Amino acid sequence: MDEFGLIDHIARRARLRADVVLGIGDDAALLQPPPGRQLAVTADTLNAGVHFPAETLPADIGWKALAVNLSDLAAMGAAPLWCTLSLSLPQADAGWLEGFVDGFFALADASGIALVGGDTTRGPLSLSITAMGAVPAGQALRRDGARVGDDIWISGMPGEAAGALRLWQRGALAVRAPAADSGHEILRQRLQRPTPRLQLGQTLHGVASAAADVSDGLLADLGHIATRSGVGAVVQAGRVPLSSALRDALGADAARDCALRGGDDYELCFTAAPERRDALQALSSRLALPLTRIGHVVEGRGVSCEGGADTGHAAGYRHFAAQ
């Protein structure tokens, strides 16, 4: 299978949509944006051994490569439209590619995003996706809207993906096969197949004042909101939800550290005025998704954490920095 065979194999799985005037097969795609909407555009690159263990199943790589981009769209409150895929492979392995596209298109089809182009090349295993979504003009969720007095919220159960990574690093969890322990399997699935909170993001228009997805760690990504908004943030560690699977696997202290500083959760952290509390609790029930108030926005700068160990350390993962 050469480069064009790879492209043809992927193209056969791509969805056809009316807003894709010209898709895979030309020098560029031609797309028709929805009227009255702004385009949200994001890009992420995943490299083997950095963003996922080298032994990860290709279907899980395909799912996660798209999921991290969809999570960025969710954080902006955007509905997915189109994406491109650039794929670097050490060799053209038909079996690997089949598994990859299975995982990729399982999520693409479920989320309604269309693959419209990209590139393939020989090299170390690496994937780069650019995703585009639509948001009503002037209603995008941004990082710069938090105001003093706002509540701070987190969706889902943060820390589970980081917990799975710690178990894998200890040799206590295999990423390629289901875990015998049901709690460990919950954590493994959260690491390998994160759920972009697309529906939540699109229902936060007019409710949230600022938002970010949690990719590098809750405290670190909340720090981006605080910096962009010119405010401070106080997190009460005891309010941050911890799943029983995470507690049982690591113990309470390590579980809390994963929830506060671990990455790869792709939950949404957002701020909202206190008068939105009832609406957010109702939204939590409607979406069957935990939404937890974990702190508040204050005057000042930076993020502080009350009730957690090592409260001065909020930095998450940073490329090119000593970890």
Image (tube, rainbow, N blue to C red):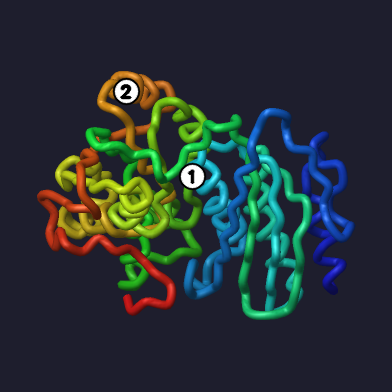
Horizontally, is 75 left or right of 134 in the view?
Answer: left
The residue located at (62%, 74%) in the rendering is 125
Horizontally, is 169 left or right of 128 in the view?
Answer: left
Q: Where's residue 76, x and y in %?
A: 51, 41
Horizontally, is 126 left or right of 205 in the view?
Answer: right
Q: In the picture, residue 209 is in which quadrant?
A: top left
Q: Where's residue 162, x and y in %?
A: 34, 59
Q: Is residue 201 positioned above or below 54 on the image? A: above
- How far apart are labels 1 and 2 at the CA level? 25 Å
Horizontally, is 217 left or right of 22 in the view?
Answer: left
The residue located at (52%, 72%) in the rendering is 55
Answer whether residue 110 is visible to the viewer in this image: no
Of the numbered discs in the image, which one, if any, rests on residue 276? Answer: 2
Q: Is residue 243 positioned above or below 61 on the image? A: above
Of the numbered discs in the image, which one, if any, rests on residue 47? Answer: none
Q: Relative to the observer, which residue lies in front, 265 or 96?
A: 265
Q: Which residue is mark 1?
A: 195
- What amino acid is at disc 1? Thr
Quarter holding the C terminus?
A: bottom left
Q: Considering the numbered disc 2 on the image, is that residue within a helix, a strand or a loop?
A: helix
The residue located at (17%, 47%) in the rendering is 237
Quarter holding the N terminus?
A: bottom right
